[in-house]
Amino acid sequence: MQIQIHSIHFDADAKLLEFVKAKLEKLQTFNNELQHCEVFLRIEKSDSRDNKLVEVKAHLPGHDLFAKRHASSFEAAMDEVHEALRRQVVKAHA
Protein backbone atom coordinates (compact mmCIF):
# COMPACT_ATOMS: atom_id res chain seq x y z
CA MET A 1 0.00 0.00 0.00
CA GLN A 2 1.23 3.46 -0.88
CA ILE A 3 0.96 6.10 1.88
CA GLN A 4 1.44 9.84 1.33
CA ILE A 5 1.56 12.11 4.37
CA HIS A 6 1.24 15.90 4.10
CA SER A 7 1.88 18.02 7.18
CA ILE A 8 0.36 21.42 6.47
CA HIS A 9 2.19 24.49 7.88
CA PHE A 10 4.45 22.46 10.19
CA ASP A 11 7.10 19.75 10.03
CA ALA A 12 5.93 16.43 11.44
CA ASP A 13 8.59 14.50 13.34
CA ALA A 14 9.60 10.96 12.37
CA LYS A 15 7.82 9.46 15.40
CA LEU A 16 4.45 10.93 14.31
CA LEU A 17 4.96 9.81 10.70
CA GLU A 18 5.75 6.25 11.82
CA PHE A 19 2.68 6.23 14.10
CA VAL A 20 0.42 7.29 11.21
CA LYS A 21 1.92 4.70 8.84
CA ALA A 22 1.58 1.91 11.42
CA LYS A 23 -2.09 2.75 12.01
CA LEU A 24 -2.88 2.76 8.30
CA GLU A 25 -1.00 -0.48 7.66
CA LYS A 26 -3.18 -2.19 10.30
CA LEU A 27 -6.18 -1.54 8.04
CA GLN A 28 -4.79 -4.10 5.61
CA THR A 29 -5.64 -6.86 8.09
CA PHE A 30 -9.32 -6.11 7.32
CA ASN A 31 -8.90 -5.78 3.55
CA ASN A 32 -5.58 -6.29 1.79
CA GLU A 33 -6.86 -4.61 -1.38
CA LEU A 34 -6.19 -1.11 0.02
CA GLN A 35 -4.08 0.57 -2.62
CA HIS A 36 -3.41 4.14 -1.59
CA CYS A 37 -3.85 6.42 1.43
CA GLU A 38 -3.35 10.16 1.49
CA VAL A 39 -3.04 11.80 4.91
CA PHE A 40 -3.33 15.48 5.77
CA LEU A 41 -2.15 16.68 9.19
CA ARG A 42 -3.13 20.24 10.13
CA ILE A 43 -2.93 22.50 13.15
CA GLU A 44 -5.97 24.76 13.01
CA LYS A 45 -6.03 28.26 14.41
CA SER A 46 -8.64 27.92 17.08
CA ASP A 47 -9.28 28.70 20.74
CA SER A 48 -10.26 25.10 21.27
CA ARG A 49 -7.80 22.54 22.66
CA ASP A 50 -8.92 20.16 19.90
CA ASN A 51 -7.02 22.03 17.19
CA LYS A 52 -5.20 19.04 15.63
CA LEU A 53 -6.90 17.78 12.48
CA VAL A 54 -6.26 14.49 10.69
CA GLU A 55 -7.87 13.74 7.32
CA VAL A 56 -7.35 10.48 5.44
CA LYS A 57 -8.46 9.56 1.93
CA ALA A 58 -8.14 5.85 1.24
CA HIS A 59 -8.74 4.01 -2.02
CA LEU A 60 -10.10 0.50 -2.41
CA PRO A 61 -10.99 -0.79 -5.87
CA GLY A 62 -14.51 0.54 -6.41
CA HIS A 63 -14.57 2.57 -3.17
CA ASP A 64 -13.12 5.86 -2.01
CA LEU A 65 -13.04 6.13 1.78
CA PHE A 66 -12.64 9.29 3.84
CA ALA A 67 -12.38 10.15 7.52
CA LYS A 68 -11.64 13.41 9.32
CA ARG A 69 -11.30 14.01 13.07
CA HIS A 70 -10.24 16.77 15.48
CA ALA A 71 -8.48 16.05 18.79
CA SER A 72 -6.01 17.56 21.24
CA SER A 73 -3.16 15.50 19.71
CA PHE A 74 -2.47 14.03 16.30
CA GLU A 75 -2.19 10.57 17.85
CA ALA A 76 -5.68 10.78 19.38
CA ALA A 77 -7.14 12.10 16.12
CA MET A 78 -5.39 9.33 14.16
CA ASP A 79 -6.83 6.70 16.54
CA GLU A 80 -10.34 8.02 15.82
CA VAL A 81 -9.69 8.20 12.06
CA HIS A 82 -8.33 4.64 12.11
CA GLU A 83 -11.50 3.36 13.78
CA ALA A 84 -13.75 5.24 11.31
CA LEU A 85 -11.80 3.87 8.34
CA ARG A 86 -11.79 0.37 9.82
CA ARG A 87 -15.60 0.42 9.90
CA GLN A 88 -15.73 1.69 6.30
CA VAL A 89 -13.24 -0.96 5.08
CA VAL A 90 -15.19 -3.76 6.77
CA LYS A 91 -18.48 -2.44 5.35
CA ALA A 92 -17.00 -2.14 1.83
CA HIS A 93 -15.58 -5.67 2.08
CA ALA A 94 -18.89 -7.22 3.15
Image (cartoon, grey):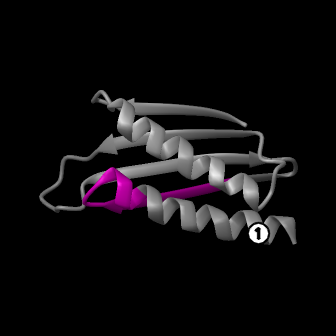
Q: Is residue 19 left or right of residue 42?
A: right
Write the start and end of the magenta stretch as one range.
Answer: 65-77
> Residue 34: horizontal and vertical position, in percent?
77, 47
Quadrant in the picture for residue 67: bottom right
Side (left or right) of 47 relative to 25: left
Along the viewing direction, whichever of 69 and 21 lies nearer the viewer: 21
Q: Is residue 54 magenta?
A: no
Which residue lies at the image location 38% right of the left edge and 30% below the top edge?
14
Element type at mark 1: helix
Residue type (three-letter) at the residue carrying disc 1: Val
| On screen, residue 50 above or below 64 | below
Residue name at image x 58 percent, y 67 percent: 84
Residue in the image at 25% along x and 47% along y = 44
Relative to 80, residue 10 above or below: above
Q: Which residue is mark 1?
A: 90
Picture residue at 42% right of the left edge, 50% below the top? 54
Query: Quadrant where the N terminus lies?
Result: top right
Question: Looking at the image, how many numbered discs can be counted on the residues?
Answer: 1
